[in-house]
Image (tube, rainbow, N blue to C red):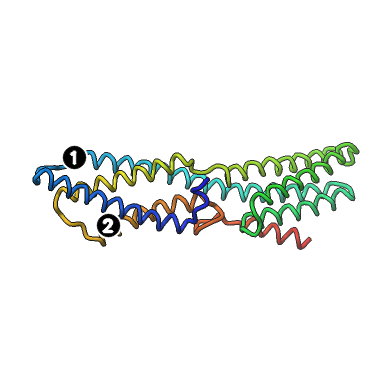
Amino acid sequence: MFFDSVPIWGLFLATIVLVVLALEAGMLVGRLRQTQAGGKAEVSGAMVGATMALLAFMLAFTFNGAAGRHDVRKAMVIEETNAIGKTWRRAGFLAEPYRSDIRGLLRNYVDVRVKAATGKMELGEAVQRSEVLHGKMWAVAEEVNKKDVGGRADGLFIQALDEVIDLHLKRVTVGSRSRVPPSIWATLYLLMAVGMVMMGIQAGLSGVRRHIGMDLALAISFSVVLFSIVDLDRPQEGLLTVSQQAMEELQIRLNAK
């Protein structure tokens, strides 16, 4: 969607501009109404408070959801690392050449996962290559099962490999497809714009000139919160990236064997 194509820092600056412009627009409207009404116009503080409270609720709800998904992504890195390591170990039960074939494919698989997570490979390409490797590994597993070389040990290996393949879909879903919906972003920005306009109108009607520094401080405060939400929602961008240390350490161990 369009929102995802905008850099995080671009959204940060755009939010500051939006808040300041909304406040200034509200002040202009408030002054105009005050002049037309001969100094008797006023805006309900309860309405402004209710709008801002609704905005605060939506921000808290969205932040909580983004933070929860961020934690899930971190946990899934550990879970997938353990599953791959378990598959590697159980591949040791297999007879040659199956053992070497599977371990070679697992090395390639871990390389793809690390490159994708660290931005060295496009996500779409990484998903495609991962699925190709799944097919190759499963073809080896089917061959092992047909020959029934090791009996129960082969079954344990196939079970571990199946878990790796299942975790791929989970990680792709949570990592790139489970995001804050566009409708939520639209609601947040709409509420923020309406709330800032109403605050500006209230200030304009009161006849008190707001200091530009206060406007900027308010704009930056909202921008920081929204920046944090976007940062949490984009695991491969920004400051709050998901650590790949566990997978990288596994990559080093596998390549050393």
Q: Nearer the viewer, residue 117 or 12?
A: 12
C-alpha separation, residue under disc 2 versus residue under disc 1: 21 Å
**Callout 2 touching callout 1 (CB < 8 Å):** no
Name the kind of residue labelled 1 in the image.
Ser
- Residue annotated with mark 2: 215
**Residue located at (73% from left, 45% from top):** 131
Q: Quadrant of residue 41?
A: top left
Q: Residue 28 appears at what percent x and percent y?
A: 22, 51
Q: Residue at x 35, y 41 (%)?
A: 57
Which mark is drawn over residue 188?
none
Give the side of residue 186 with respect to residue 46, left or right. right
Pointer 1 residue: 44
Residue 173, given in percent of the width and then of the height, sits at: 60, 42
Q: Residue at x 73, y 49 (%)?
A: 129
Q: Is residue 8 left or right of residue 57?
A: right
Callout 2: SS: helix
Q: Residues within 10 Å of mark 1 (few under 14, many from 20)?
A: few
In this orientation, which residue lies closer to the viewer: 175 or 149?
Answer: 175
- As helix, strand or loop, the secondary structure at mark 1 comes to loop
Q: Is residue 199 left or right of residue 111?
A: left
Give whichever of 43, 106 is nearer the camera. 43
